[in-house]
């Protein structure tokens, strides 16, 4: 059964087309991975579902009924919570004070503290209600954001790059909790650039590229190669031809993005011609080994020595 549906969503920011007829269907009790390069429109699409952005066109349905949240509070009241990549934490407020702010009714820190304890016992997301949020580690701050969503009885959680700032052990703990939440009937939209995580936990996958859905389906029906090809926009791409060779990295032209290799994989590189006579060559690097990671950074000139060194030493 579909619990959340976005159909034909369009959104422009000035002259930039962020989304063009993008659609997504989330089934109840599943994890739906939303994949794509940076700038593909993943977060924008989910911010529309979460009430932060109004779409220019398209329809949303929640549990089969029309759904058009005017604010995050309205979305949360309907059972949909979003945990953003950059946490909405006030360092000076305690854990309980954060929860009290999102609870309905009178502002009651004591009631919020009791809820934090109860949620910790029930879900394993334990937190000290009296501790200032600024004293929490990164994984505990993320836990607080999830507890804030659960405090409003969210049955749909949108997690935006949730493991990007976590250690491997913390990421494993979070993924275990996501499985538990799913087993209890909850639904999760997982926005991630880590392909191995998506393939390992998702029931369904959707790939966005330049604001459009280019691939969607059940996890067991899609191969790793299909997903990578959809993300990069090259149907001929495979994990062998995608590897950046030493000779390609040894060029002295400026490139955009870090260069890294590992025993588990390598960076795939896509280049675009300069937009002007004095503009650097633009490049997008994408991980095709244990995970896929796309990013764009200020240009960095690579010398042959730097490039050869980057290739010869696995990343640590």
Image (cartoon, rainbow, N blue to C red):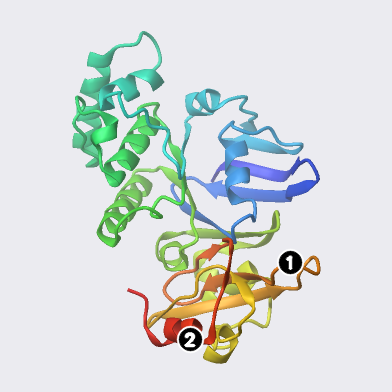
Q: Nearer the viewer, residue 279 or 212?
A: 279
Image height of 63 relative to 297, above or below: above
Q: Secondary structure at mark 1?
A: loop
Say which residue appears at 30% left-offset and 20% top-offset.
Answer: 97
Q: Quadrant of the C terminus?
A: bottom left
First-in-chain label (2 vs 1): 1
x%, y% of residue 7? Answer: 70, 44
x%, y% of residue 247? Answer: 57, 91
Number of marks in the rendered image:
2
Say which residue appears at 31% left-offset and 51% top-offset.
Answer: 174
What's the distance in space between the residues labelled 2 and 1, CA to CA? 23 Å
Q: Give the image quarter of residue 150.
A: top left
Q: Is 174 placed left or right of 257 in the picture?
A: left
The tag on residue 279 is: 1
Identify the residue under disc 2: 305
**Farthest residue, direction top:** 106
Image height of 161 relative to 68, above or below: below
Say which residue appears at 49% left-offset and 24% top-offset.
Answer: 77
């Amino acid at each position: 059964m579909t619990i959340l549906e976005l159909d034909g969503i369009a959104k422009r920011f000035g002259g930039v087309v962020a989304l063009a007829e993008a659609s997504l269907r989330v089934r109840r009790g599943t994890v739906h991975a939303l994949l794509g390069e940076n700038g593909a429109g993943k977060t924008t699409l989910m911010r529309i579902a979460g009430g932060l952005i109004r779409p220019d066109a398209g329809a949303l349905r929640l549990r089969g009924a029309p759904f058009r949240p005017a604010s995050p509070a309205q979305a949360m009241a309907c059972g949909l919570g979003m945990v953003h990549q950059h946490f909405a934490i006030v360092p000076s407020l305690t854990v309980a004070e954060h929860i009290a702010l999102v609870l309905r009714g009178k502002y009651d820190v004591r009631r919020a503290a009791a809820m934090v304890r109860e949620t910790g016992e029930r879900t394993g997301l334990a937190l000290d209600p009296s501790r200032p949020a600024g004293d929490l580690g990164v994984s505990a701050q993320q836990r607080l954001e999830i507890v804030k969503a659960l405090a409003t009885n969210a049955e749909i959680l949108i997690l935006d790059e949730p493991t990007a700032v976590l250690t491997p052990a913390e990421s494993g703990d979070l993924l275990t909790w996501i499985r538990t939440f799913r087993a209890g009937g909850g639904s999760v939209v997982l926005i991630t650039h880590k392909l191995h995580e998506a393939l390992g936990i998702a029931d369904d996958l959707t790939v966005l590229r330049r604001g459009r859905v280019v691939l969607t389906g059940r996890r067991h029906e899609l191969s790793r190669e299909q997903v990578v090809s959809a993300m990069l926009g090259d149907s001929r791409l495979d994990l062998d031809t995608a590897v950046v060779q030493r000779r390609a990295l040894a060029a002295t032209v400026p490139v955009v993005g870090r260069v890294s290799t590992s025993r588990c994989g390598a960076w795939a590189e896509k280049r675009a011609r300069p937009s002007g006579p004095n503009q650097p060559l633009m490049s997008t690097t994408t991980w095709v080994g244990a995970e896929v990671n796309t990013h764009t950074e200020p240009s960095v000139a690579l010398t042959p020595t730097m490039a050869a060194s980057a290739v010869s030493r696995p990343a640590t």
